[in-house]
Image: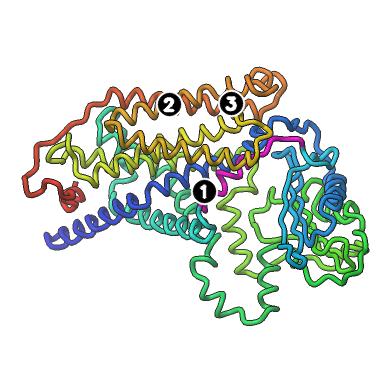
Amino acid sequence: MPHDQHAKGRGFRQSMSGLHTWTGLLLGWVLYAMFLTGTVSFFKEELSQWMRPELPRLTQPLDPAVVAQRVADEIGRIAPNASQWSIKLPDGRSNAVYAFWRTPGVGKVAPGFGQDYFDPITGHRAEAQETLGGDFFYRFHFQFYYMSPFWGRLLAGLAAMSMLVAIVAGVITHKKIFTDFFTFRWGKGQRSWLDAHNALSVFGLPFHVMITYTGLVTLMALYVPWGERAAIKTPAERQQLTAELSAFIRAGKPSGDKVPLGSIEAMVRQAQQRWGTTDVGRVNSANPGDATARIAVTRGDAGRVSMSPDYLEFDGVTGKLLEVHDHVGTAAETRGVLYALHIGRFSDLETRWLYFIVSFMGTAMVGTGLVMWTVKRRQKLPDPERPFFGFRLVERLNIASIAGLSIAMTAFLWANRLLPTAMADRAFWEIHVFFIVWGLTLLHALLRPAKSAWVEQLWTAAVLLALIPVLNAATTQRPLWHSLASGDWVFACIDLMCVALALLHAVLAIRTARHSARVGPPRSASKRGGMPDMSREAAT
């Protein structure tokens, strides 16, 4: 290759290296939190079961039609004036029925919203402690909970876009990336971090691209709303769009004629004849108790590689089938498939574990990239004992974002077991504990030397995780040995997974404690206090 072409190619890769580095760093802490909480969310239903230990596990499958009728009757008693309600039926992964309802505003009384969990056997409210369970991590994954939904999802979108850019730039930068995938040099400091980062990136590369891109697609109407606004002009078009994206029937103006609902069980039976006995996911009602009532029975997610709505619409009074919604437009179906690929609810147990493992590797990929930024630059600091402010800030944020997040997530589980059952706003206090502990890990990282902070926080996470089975045994009637003996695999697997993660954190703590930083020769005084020379680093 001629010299000028070689220099041009090297310059392009250097530019991509800088782009990869800075897009990965600037929102890397947000990406790490999104990846880790998103990974846990693949088993959010099982985690929710673990966080409601009072609810017995279902050893026999229940008839969805009977369960739907029981819970609908109970909601009718609890909220007789509801303008809308929705029931999520139990499946093989959940042991309770989740339902919510809306009540219209009357006079000076504002519209209301209620939600609760119900016992599928009795239909009554479940006698379980108040908690968001695994849904907290799921919601945090894309809107960070305390932030408003708009700004939280906008931040998640920016992080996903930066991730997509970093992936493309990283592939271009590492011209030997597939060769390096088979190379790992243990105990070599910076080289080891780079090898780990490369291996984790290449192994799950198709998944990382898919999960990032599909995450953006799920909220595309928020990020690029102009096309939708230009295409949709009338209320009828808006209603058609809603029908293609959601199975929730809009509650129109009620007639005022009070008429009881028809048989929910009979409507679900019709859906079972079409889809199968256990393949009913949700029952939605609009204007229940009114002559204009409508019922929608939606198909479950299992085995459907699409989140586009598939439902039957009934007259809520007579039970007559009014309409079958079993197909949508090409655009809506494309979105439905990409959405389903992102959240993986169609998957069986083996596929869900595969999602979990590769997503966990993606979390490690982001984490190793953040750590590698500091490891690489520490060697070139003019005075490693007194690094410049930007370096110290990144280093401390790395500690709190990686080790500190493990502590905060484990503290959330501890709070679930230790907070009083009758405590007011108990579910919110579990979340408060998560953020308070996470904030304390940042304070600890700022006050302690970096290496000491890493070791102490990793050991703290290891100890807290290792004691989860002990805590569970002390506070519930479902200890690990009992779960193993009775085949209660949800409780057993979560306890065992906490032990496995404790061992991982312990190994990282030991290796960090033994590691000695290799510091390069001092740089010139003109570089002191400034940012590293990116052109030199990109060339390495």
Q: Is residue 477 above or below residue 86?
A: above
Q: Identify the residue at image location x=28%, y=44%.
A: 393
Q: Which residue is tagged 2?
A: 460
Query: Amino acid under label 3?
Result: Asp
| Residue located farthest toward the left when viewing the structure as drawn | 525
- Residue 351 visible here: no
Dot 1: few (<14), some (14–19), or many (≥20) neighbours within 10 Å? many
Q: Residue at x 60, y 39 (%)?
A: 43
Question: Which is more N-terminal, label 2 or label 1?
Answer: 1
Residue where numbered disc 1 is placed: 141
The residue shown at (83%, 59%) is 81
Q: Which residue is mark 3?
A: 495
Q: Is residue 232 magenta?
A: no
Q: Earlier in the sequence, mark 3 or mark 2?
A: 2
Residue range corresponding to the magenta coloring: 127-146
- For numbered disc 1, what is the local secondary structure? helix
**What secondary structure is found at the residue carrying circle 2?**
helix
